[in-house]
Image (cartoon, grey):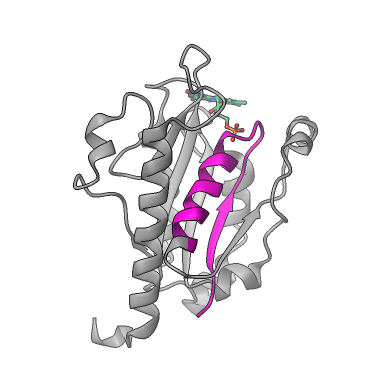
Amino acid sequence: MSPVLILYYSRHGSTKRLADAIAQGVSMENVPVILRTVASLNKEDDGEAAHNALAPVVSIQELEQCSALALGSPTRFGNMAASMKHFLDSTSNLWLKGSLIDKPACVFTSSSSMHGGQESTLLSMMLPLLHHGMVLCGLPYSEPELHNTISGGSPYGVTHVANHNLAHANQLSPDEKALCIAQGKRLAKFARQLSQKDTSEI
Ligand SMILES: Cc1cc2nc3c(=O)[nH]c(=O)nc-3n(C[C@H](O)[C@H](O)[C@H](O)COP(=O)(O)O)c2cc1C
């Protein structure tokens, strides 16, 4: 089976922590997973990112061949980072070929404040994936942490609040981490099911 691709942009490492925890969930389903990042448009970001041992930069072939996609970006002014949008804007050949149609996908983000635009960022990342024909999967409220979290986590996708007033500013809270693992498992299950199906029957 082709790997699940976890593709993220991260400057200070919070979005990377979400990516790593989602990968853990995918692996728990015995589904192969690869972590990748996108090139930065911003020189300032390069210096910061160098400290965080980010994943290798993704290739278009890796995106084309994935069985599922988890797409993550920090919240920047209530939207995804420009570097991620720039990468997505380079995927029109895959759109023309329909390479991503019927593949499952989820989205994730980190922001510094609780109400600083996480949900708008998640929704903004869903739009290009819907244009690609991907099948979006969030998180159901059967996940208990979705009811209990006092920081990140939403039905639209997993999140982290990196507010320094919170006890877990530099790491995921236990609820955020549990939701990442649940999201990874859910994405992996859909990837397995959809890759076995003739999607013309759906
Ligand atoms: C240009 C810029 C814009 C940002 N905009 C927001 C924002 O709209 N809301 C918010 O809560 N945090 C905002 N932040 C803070 C980041 O979302 C936050 O630090 C995030 O956790 C960074 O993720 P990273 O550690 O993966 O780089 C912004 C940061 C930058 C550099």
Residue extending farthest to the left is: 142
Q: Nearer the viewer, residue 25 or 89?
A: 25
Quarter occupied by the C terminus: bottom left
- Residue 154 in sight in this render: yes
Q: Horizontal and vertical percent for residue 98?
A: 46, 76
Quadrant containing ligand 1 reads: top right
- Residue 126 in sight in this render: no
Vertical order, 141 against 132 (above or below): above
Residue at the location (43% across, 30% down)?
173
Q: Horizontal and vertical percent for residue 13?
A: 63, 35
Q: Residue 7 is drawn in which quadrant?
A: bottom right
Q: Horizontal and vertical percent for residue 186?
A: 34, 60
Q: Nearer the viewer, residue 100 or 144?
A: 144
Vertical order, 194 against 120 (above or below): below
Residue extending farthest to the top is: 165
Region rendered in magenta? 1-27
Vertical order, 95 against 165 (above or below): below
Q: Horizontal and vertical percent for residue 124?
A: 42, 44
Q: Does 48 sit left or right of 33 as displayed?
A: right
Residue at the location (40% across, 80% down)?
195
Vertical order, 62 against 167 (above or below): below
Membership of 14 in magenta stretch: yes
Q: Across the whole image, how many numbered discs are drawn on residues? A: 0
Membership of 137 in magenta stretch: no
Residue at the location (42% across, 56% down)?
184
Residue at the location (54% across, 48% down)?
19
